[in-house]
Amino acid sequence: MIIERMPFLHGFRRIIFEYQPLVDAILESLGLQDPENQELPESSRSASEDHSKFLVLQKLLESESRSAFYQEGVSYTLLKVSELGLVRAAEVLLHNGADITFEDPVTYYTALHIAVLRNQPDMVELLVQRGADINRRDRIHESSPLDLASEEPERLPCLRRLLELGANINAADKHGKTALLHALASSDGVQIHNIENIRLLLEGGADVKATTKDGDTVFTFIIFLLGETVGSDAEEAKMIHRFCFQATRLLMAHGANPSECPPYESLTHLCLKSFRLHFPLLRFLLESGASHSCSLHGPTCWSGFDIIFERLCSHLSESEDDSFSIDLLQKAETALELMMASGPVVKLPSNFQIDLSHCRYHQDKIQALFGKLKQLENSPPTLKHLCRVYLRQFLQPWPVDVKVKALPLPNRLKRYLLIDPSASLEQV
């Protein structure tokens, strides 16, 4: 193969110059010049698909078929027409000896990789039908065509086509990263939103339990993005939160567990520790049935009740600002109510206590919240509590707010079921 026998750099230059004239002649016969990083105008596309030009191309290929660098030339040209989505031209080149496994001397991408990168789904289908390995990985990054298609929302048509053609949806690269993990890792929540790519992969059977060799899971990348919101621009933070919410909802709908161990890889644990910043996402997790303690080891590993009180005391030791304190206490109380409403029996860590010695403000309110929690733990559940638990469970999946508001109950009971002090029932 041409790549295997070329010396590095100077050999690359020599070989490119050796077959570049043939490449230029083929492109010229199609009415094209080398379109470096440019989209092909529709007028040029139509011209290049003109039947008369294929007759010229065929004669050129026949006349050059015995030249020393013929196969390298037509194979390199296949990369170019794949980039532009010129299906007819690619068919002619393949019929005349173009090597479908030929790699770009710089990127080591094949024609199939390049077609995906430039979002040419019809070219993708042609190449696969003509024998291109749909799961082939490039030699530098070990990315498959499906990996590349998953990384940009603009490549969704290629992603869909590859899945229809039978690409291995759960194949992993040398790091253990699947296409789903590529889609999550490539999303920044601001400019790149791979939500539809993620949705398509999940609907196609992508494994939500996939883990890289470094231990990264589907939630690792969401946890990273949430960390990026701290101290960032308010509008960007809002966009990132929206993306994380949408991605989490999709992942949980397909069985992903946000409360797994270890804690630093647990989305629920992070949202509990930062409930002041990530409260909407925490609420969604708890509403959707996520465990508020370690789903593997239980409350002895980590517990949401413990974390909420620890963070509450920590925050109220730093500020006595009334608006800050009221908001914080309200969020803490709602989070505790949501956790208590997750089951008929409250499961607290053994010997669970709170330390108010370092809490400078609102100790009485924190003690009142703790007392309410201990009372529920030590007493038989009330009928009111049991009704709330079973009604909320019956109305799931999330969201339950619309379903609660539709119930033929007084507004006071609806508020109790909603566990949301800010909920408006005026139009119920």
Image (cartoon, rainbow, N blue to C red):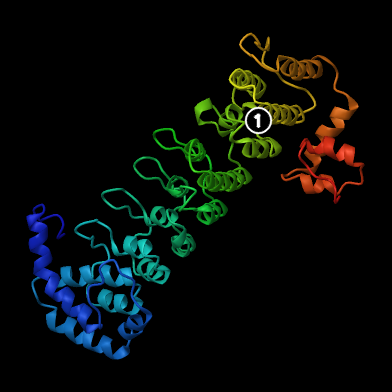
Decide if residue 325 is in sight here.
yes
Q: Which of 225 and 356 is in front in this view?
A: 356
- Write down the residue under mark 1: 291
Helix, strand, or loop for circle 1?
A: loop
* Residue 167 x, y percent position in the rendering: 44, 57
Residue type beneath disc 1: Ser
- Pick the quarter of the image with the N terminus: bottom left
Q: In which quarter of the image is residue 368?
A: top right
- Relative side of 35 to 199, left or right: left
Relative to 167, residue 417 above or below: above
Relative to 342, residue 132 above or below: below
Decide if residue 132 is in sight here.
no
Total of numbered circles in the picture? 1
Image point (8%, 72%), residue name: 68
Q: Nearer the viewer, residue 184 or 254?
A: 184
Q: For mark 1, does the 10 Å Cα neighbourhood hold few (<14), some (14 to 19), or many (20 or more) residues?
A: many
Q: Which residue lies furthest to the bottom in this view?
A: 52
* Residue 324 x, y percent position in the rendering: 65, 29
Image point (9%, 75%), residue name: 67
Q: Which residue lies furthest to the front in this view?
A: 321
* Residue 188 x, y percent position in the rendering: 46, 47
Image point (67%, 12%), residue name: 354
